[in-house]
Amino acid sequence: MQRAIRLVVSLSIAITACSASGIDTAALSELPLASPETITELLTLSEQPVVINVWASWCIPCRAEAPLLDKAVSRFGEVVQFISINVRDSQNSAKEFIAELLAETNIEHFFDQHGAVPLALGGSHGIPLTFFYGPGGSLVKLHFGVLDERTLALQIDELLARS
Amino acid sequence: MEFTLLGATAIALTSVYCMLWLEEYHDKTASHSRKLRDLILPATIVGLIAGRLAAMIGNGVNPLTNPQEIIILRAGVATGPAATAVLIWIAWAGRSKLQTLADRLAPAALAGLAGWHGACAVRDTCLGTPSDLPWALTQHGSSVARHPVELYASLAYLIIAVALIIFKPFPSGFAAGAGLVGAAGIRLLTEPIRPSLDGGPISWYLAGLLSGVALIGWVVSRSRGATLD
């Protein structure tokens, strides 16, 4: 029994050590700043449906839903515009998060220090938040909390059906 | 919101316990229902943890370096590994009377699935792909009518669960096989009209279906062998 415990602990340490990697964010460019005006203009001018995800690097549920967004972008990135807005965070932490979880994903990232954008769009201080907009900026759905695959797939399908 | 998931889980567990009570009421010889009631809650916890771990690993998230994400169930619970973990737990816990327990468990498990899918109204996840059928439902503010796919699944599971209680007796092992076929088959049938990012875990459903068919085939051949003897 003790041998088994030692083996499990050793394996855990080894796996943890192998997967732990320092993320060099020095080479990553700063996230562009977002304001309610810039995002609203972007939405108004959009010819595609838009999904806006609001997150922070310290938000554990945001980390949990990032792979789902990655999957959605891989499948629908050609027909839906995906935007992510980092709120109440630091540029470095945001860049680390993106490098770790969304590096390969074609998402437009923005930085909103004070969280003004989600409030202006009708959201709240709580995160994660996801807005689903039709072309031209008509709000279809505002989802509070972590996204699950069914909800994300259904809302994207709804956006595409209405387009 | 996370409480909707908790609410749906509570409804599913309540459905399981109700079906166990119904089974006991319908068949006074169902002496293993009390043991099953004691197994359900730990089995559910084991399944949720296993399914969450599998989903995290499948999404490239290391659970050892991100243990806090294990509790974020809404981010995804892999159905196949979760179901497998539940079955392994039940099999280990009830190993002394496995076949009988499996037969008793099948209607309750299907009732749990019926409750979970029926609780889609709580989680606002009832709708599937667009449909012109007269009973198709629309999302609030939408004009796109959709299959109430989760309600289809819930009704189908409930019918099979009740049938497994009413149309007794069956050869030993048949109810368990039929439960597997029902659970996997209903998911396979409804998956094409259920919105998904990657088509769903079809391989797991096929594995469940084939396992159930194999079990039923084994039960039938054993019954025929016994008859010939």
Image (tube, rainbow, N blue to C red):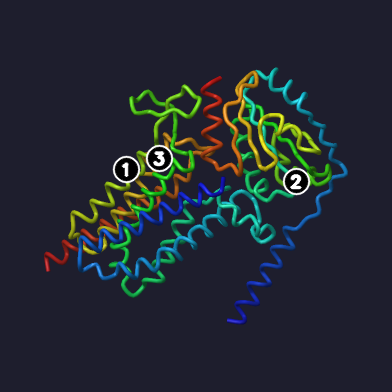
Q: Quadrant of the C terminus of chain B?
A: bottom left
Disc 1 to disc 3, C-alpha distance:
9 Å
Q: How many marks?
A: 3
Mark 2 Cα shell of 10 Å, populated few (<14), some (14-19), many (≥20) = many
Q: Dot 1 falls on which chain?
A: B
Q: Do labels 1 and 2 share a chain?
A: no
For residue A91, side relative to residue A132 (left or right): right
Q: Which of A7 and B115 lies nearest the eye of the viewer?
A: B115
Is A95 on the left-hand or right-hand side of A79?
A: right
Residue at 41% of width from left, 62% of height from top? Answer: B87
Q: Residue B142 in the image: x percent, y percent?
A: 49, 24
Cα distance between the residues tagged 3 and 2: 35 Å
Mark 3 secondary-structure assignment: helix
Question: Circle 3 sits on which residue?
Answer: B150
Q: Which of marks 3 and 2 is in front?
A: 3
What residue sits right under mark 1 in the picture? B155
Read off the residue under disc 2. Answer: A97
Dot 1 lies on which element? helix
Mark 3 crowd level (few <14, some 14–19, many ≥20, 10 Å Cα): many
Which chain's residue wears label 2? A
Residue B150 drawn at (x, y percent): 40, 40
